């Protein structure tokens, strides 16, 4: 079982899109995958057209409340979801202590049945993000290829490093930076890429995800890249990305 958090304080960089599509591809490969949404926006549910409320299943605020996992929402055989809603916001105020409130997940029998747990986090530098980081084996930072993103990536990396040093009991490792919504035709892209590569070296993922109208439209229709033709660029890129992540986490 490997827990991976997707983090970045910048909004709209593709955290949720990455969580949903990477999880779907891992599940499609035969891995058992659990998504835990720690974002009060609850976007994973919207994306997958699932309820955010937990009358018959566990929601992410339950994890903070009773440290217990009951019924888990099924997306399909291999892909399950612990959704989120605004009720989790109240746990955002609390100062997190060594090990975090979600530490129990690492020893939980149900969680151990999964090969991967992917955690979606809010666009903040807050305790909810720290909770995710503190229980994760790995974290991934998505970013848009914009000039100002360089600063944002640095801030996200510093926040993660500080969190891991101060509150994580595990040695949470950096998978790297994923460039999302790339338009290689933009004049500035080459310069941006060269600068980022110089700063990040191997921490910049080889695979990037292009700007795509199919991906932009997919939450409207509750689609993942698995619903796209296998010849589509978005499908191929996410397939390559999933493979690169598997290599980086040594599966
Ligand atoms: N490669 C892409 N091409 C086109 N649109 C994309 C791409 N990736 C993401 N988007 C769109 O950009 C928007 C933001 O993506 P997403 O919600 O995944 O970002 P986020 O980082 O989770 O946002 P937030 O910080 O609010 O949680 C969404 O409408 C999504 O459909
Ligand atoms: Mg999101």
Image (cartoon, rainbow, N blue to C red):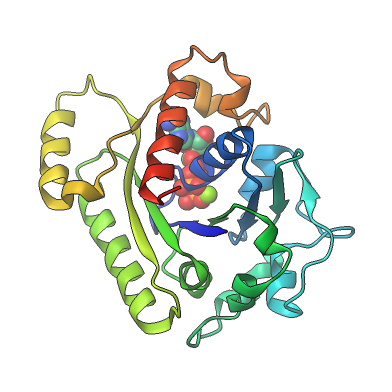
Is residue 181 visible to us here?
yes
Q: Residue 92 at what x, y percent from top left? A: 56, 75
Residue at x 67%, y 26% (from the top left corner): 221
Instruction: Check the image and report above or below for 185 versus 135.
Output: above
Q: Residue 127 at what x, y percent from top left? A: 50, 75
Residue closer to the observer: 210 or 103: 103
Residue at x 41%, y 58% (from the top left corner): 139
Apparent side of residue 21 relative to residue 110 in the rendered image (left or right): left
Instruction: Check the image and report above or below for 246 versus 60.
Output: above
* Quadrant housing the N terminus: bottom right
Residue at x 29%, y 25% (from the top left corner): 183
Is residue 84 visible to us here?
no
Instruction: Check the image and report above or below for 216 versus 44.
Output: above
Apparent side of residue 244 relative to residue 242 in the rendered image (left or right): left
Residue closer to the observer: 151 or 160: 160
Work out which residue is located at the far front of the displayed protein and give it. 251
Residue at x 43%, y 36% (from the top left corner): 243
Numbered marks: total? 0
Q: Residue 145 at what x, y percent from top left? A: 26, 38
Q: Residue 201 at what x, y percent from top left? A: 16, 48
Apparent side of residue 204 relative to residue 112 in the rendered image (left or right): left
């Amino acid at each position: 079982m490997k827990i991976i958090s997707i983090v970045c304080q910048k909004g709209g960089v593709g955290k949720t899109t990455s969580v949903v599509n990477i999880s779907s591809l891992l599940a499609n490969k035969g891995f058992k995958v659990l998504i835990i949404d720690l974002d009060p926006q609850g976007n994973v549910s919207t994306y997958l057209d699932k309820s955010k409320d937990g009358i018959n299943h566990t929601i992410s605020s339950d994890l903070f409340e009773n440290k217990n996992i009951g019924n888990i929402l099924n997306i399909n055989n291999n892909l399950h979801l612990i959704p989120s809603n605004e009720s989790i916001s109240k746990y955002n105020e609390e100062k997190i202590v060594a090990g975090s409130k979600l530490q129990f997940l690492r020893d939980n029998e149900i969680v151990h049945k999964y090969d991967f747990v992917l955690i979606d986090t809010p666009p903040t530098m807050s305790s909810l993000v720290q909770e995710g980081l503190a229980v994760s084996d790995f974290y991934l930072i998505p970013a848009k290829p914009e000039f100002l993103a360089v600063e944002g990536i640095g801030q996200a990396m510093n926040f993660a490093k500080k969190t891991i040093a101060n509150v994580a009991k595990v040695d949470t490792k950096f998978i790297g930076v994923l460039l999302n919504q790339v338009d290689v035709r933009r004049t500035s892209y080459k310069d941006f890429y060269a600068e980022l590569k110089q700063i990040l070296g191997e921490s910049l993922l080889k695979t990037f995800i292009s700007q795509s109208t199919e991906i932009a439209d997919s939450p409207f229709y509750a689609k993942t890249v698995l619903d796209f033709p296998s010849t589509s660029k978005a499908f191929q890129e996410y397939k390559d990305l999933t493979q690169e992540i598997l290599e980086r986490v040594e599966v």
